[in-house]
Amino acid sequence: LRLVAERESPARIPPWLLVLRLLLAASLVAAVMQPLINAETRLFGSGPLYVIVDDDWASAQRWPARLEAMRGLIDHAGRSGRSVALVRTAPTPKGVTAQSMQLMAAADARSMLERMQPRPWRADRRATIQRLLEWAANGNHRPGDVVWLSSGLEAVDAPKTDTMDALTRRLRRLGSVRVMSEPAGRLSVILRPPENAGKAMVLRAERPAVTGDALTARGLAALGLAVRALDDEGQVLTRVPLVFADGETKAEAKFELPTELRNRLVRLEVAGIAHVGAVVLVDERWRRRPVGLLGSASVDQPLLDARHYLRQALSPFTEIRLGSVAQLMQRPLAVMVMPDGELPAPVEQAALKPWLDKGGILVRFAGPNLARDAGTMDQLLPVRIRRGNRVIGGALSWRKPETLAPFAESSPFHGIVVPEDVRVRRQVLAEPSLDLADKTWARLSDGTPLVTAERRGQGWLVLVHTTADGTWTDLSFSGVYVNMLRRLVDLSQGVTGGAGGLAAPVANLDAFGRLGDPPGGATAISPVDLAAGKVGPANPPGFYGDTRLRRALNLGAGLPAMAALGDLPSGVARSGYSGSSALDLRPWLLAFAAMLFLVDTFFSLHMRGLLRFGRGVAVMLLASLSWLGAASALAQDADALSNSLETRLAYVLTGNSRIDEISRAGLTGLTTILWRRTAAELGKPRGVDPETDELAFFPLLYWPVIANAGIGPEATERVRAYLRSGGTILFDTRDQTDDGGSMRELARRLALPALVPVDAGHVLTRSFYLLREFPGRWAGGALWVEKAGERVNDGVSPVIAGSHDWAAAWAMDEAQRPLFAVVPGGERQREMAFRFGINLVMYTLTGNYKADQVHMPAIIRRLGQ
């Protein structure tokens, strides 16, 4: 047999398949290594990462930037396997569990970070650093990296031991130190409580002084801001420019409001600055109550007239009116002051009774006339008066003039400092009675009553047992005279005798300047601390008191002058805030490995003869590969599908949660009214971000314009494309102003067309209802549309603009009740606002098909011809 030995060669993997599998293995190995693009290398140590953050009031201005920077630091530590200590410098309120200093895994630190919010009071850096160093020493923690995310501010008069220079020197024992802070030009502006200057209010604001190398940032360049005055419903009462001159740290502005508007004022805020230091709450101290003075002023000898001293004391904080009882009662009046010798006739006394019952305050001063008559036929006295007067001091008296005794806690004058140089030489005496002590609000040092009062209905009848001028006393020449009259005026707004004690928190501001319910740990505050503006964990800024009286505690009242961080010690690095810009390639590598695995599987089965690689298999392979790339697009397509299947209105997200909520509630209310009254069935309104969202699905965008609202290049191009494709935007400045030029800036960036006021013949006036005006929450003002030109988009204007705050007028709660009052036309105005909204939606949906009605007279004339 001639056997031929067959040579068998081992099977070999095709080179291309070998390369594919090597790529697959390399992708998996690389994914495990978690490669990064633009990986940051700002941490150089190998020990723990100590992240110190100033989470005080000043950090609220750009809190998201601080969070992003901390996320980047913690993620970097996590990739390096390093533990993290997260340290907050703002004190923790009592009753709130404080986070103890501890080293934790990066994941735990990230979880803690997401729950962190800034606090509306000052940081205590020195105490925090002392606790950190003691904890690190007791735990024998090895050195690592220290990164301090600073607010960029420190007090001008801070002790040297409390400065950032001294504290960062102490931190060096924990490792390398880096300080991150704001550029000087972005530091926080502080608004101080206003001062009364007659009928005007004087506003003062400060910005941090800039020293050292921070001067290179042009931190003291000229800066133009605006202060808005708001009422309790958020309505803008006025807007005041506030300008910092080049190189100046202080700015001042003055404004006047009619008494009716000034008495509605509850809040002052710097537009475009979102922290509590730029907010001032206003209480009765800044309101001008109408006060009537009985009688007419003496022209010949004003310094001998008691009304002269009363006017001088009351004019800084009240509106003073002179006249008889009949003349004064013709207008609303909070307080009536009756000097000696001005006793009204019995008929006028009877007219005062219902006014007192409704809450009026009548303040009487004694004198020779009252002492002589001793209350004969006089029903306007809180206590019985002895005939004659008591002389204290003088040639016929052994005693010296009496001084004032400290005010009791039950007195509305409690808390007023009593000067030692005020003397009372004469007074009228009250007859002793069982209730005299309860009716006494002020006493002389010998215990005799100086001020007595009695409840009359909801009002008060008050008697000062001495003169309003200097005849019997030095009281009218002192500051305590002004303060006592101010407290009496406050009584007209419901202040009771117990107002001088501790005041409980009613509503408090958070670090972003938002007013809400008192937080945990907030406690009552003493009058002394309230007057001094002592804000802290136990007493956050806000309103204190009760339903009858609210006193404002403002952060700006107690803050010292601030300065930007100066030079730091050598070896301490310094940088601005920046988030993590690193791109994690792990998801992409895993997706690439999965794709290679599918390709390898298909070709391996085909080479073994287990799978014929026909057209169907090729199609399946391509579909599988395409699915990997399309998975991320499916979520976006779901939104697009939902928006394309159902017509809906949309509003532009501003980043201000309150304004965005009003926009949502307003468009929801309008959608409900449309469903009730028309055939239009619209879906739930949606908030959109022009930077990321596709706008083409929405026929109408509601755009509330806010101060200092920038718009990026990508958003600009999206909005321009939306307008070119037939979309319509309703721009609303919401406060009868152009919001400091924000609307003009938007118009410039978006290249908006020229606008003209809507005339009586425009289709908007008759697209559903016949309208002559277009009110929102505010009435008046023009509605602007594109100037008529080519018949593009069926003649529908791409831009409609106004300042009526339409969303607030349309806004309703779940029970279909309006959320905001409309001014000044009541519910009739709200109905007209809804009608405008319906006309607007019909106009954008149907075009100008009703324009024939506008041209009806011309059409009829042509038909007649």
Image (cartoon, rainbow, N blue to C red):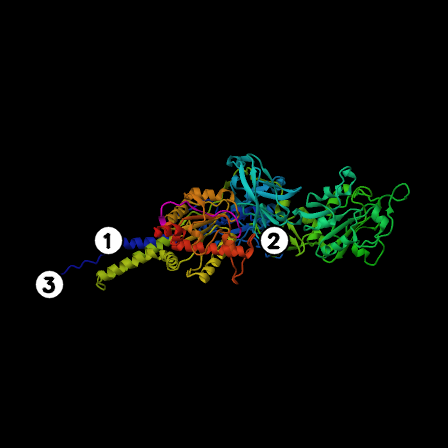
Q: What residue does disc 1 label? A: 15
Q: CA distance from mark 1 to mark 3?
A: 35 Å
For marks 1 and 2, the one nearer the N-term is: 1
Which is nearer the eye, 246 or 803?
803
Q: Is residue 465 magenta?
A: no
Q: Label 1 is placed on what type of residue?
A: Pro
Residue matched to label 3:
3
Residue 276 visible in this rendered orientation of the protein: yes
Tag 2–tag 3 contact (CB < 8 Å): no
Label 3: how many residues lie within 10 Å, few (<14), some (14-19) or many (20+)? few
Q: Secondary structure at mark 1?
A: helix
Please provide the residue range marked out in magenta.
Answer: 777-793
Q: Indicate the position of residue 85 as horizontal and vertical percent values.
A: 53, 51
Q: Main secondary structure of the magenta part?
A: loop
Q: Dots 1 and 3: beta carbons under 8 Å?
A: no
Looking at the rendered structure, which numbered label has been put on residue 346?
Answer: none
> Mark 2 — residue?
508
Split into 4 quadrants, where in the image is the N terminus? bottom left
Residue 529, given in percent of the width and then of the height, sits at: 68, 49
Does residue 111 appear anywhere in the picture?
no
Say if 200 sits above or below 359 in the image. above
Up/down of 423 relative to 625, above or below: above
Disc nearer the start of the sequence (2/3): 3
Question: What secondary structure is marked by label 2?
Answer: strand
> Left or right: 492 with respect to 555?
right
Which residue shows up at 45% across the image and 61% down it? 677
Which residue appears farthest toward the left when viewing the image? 1
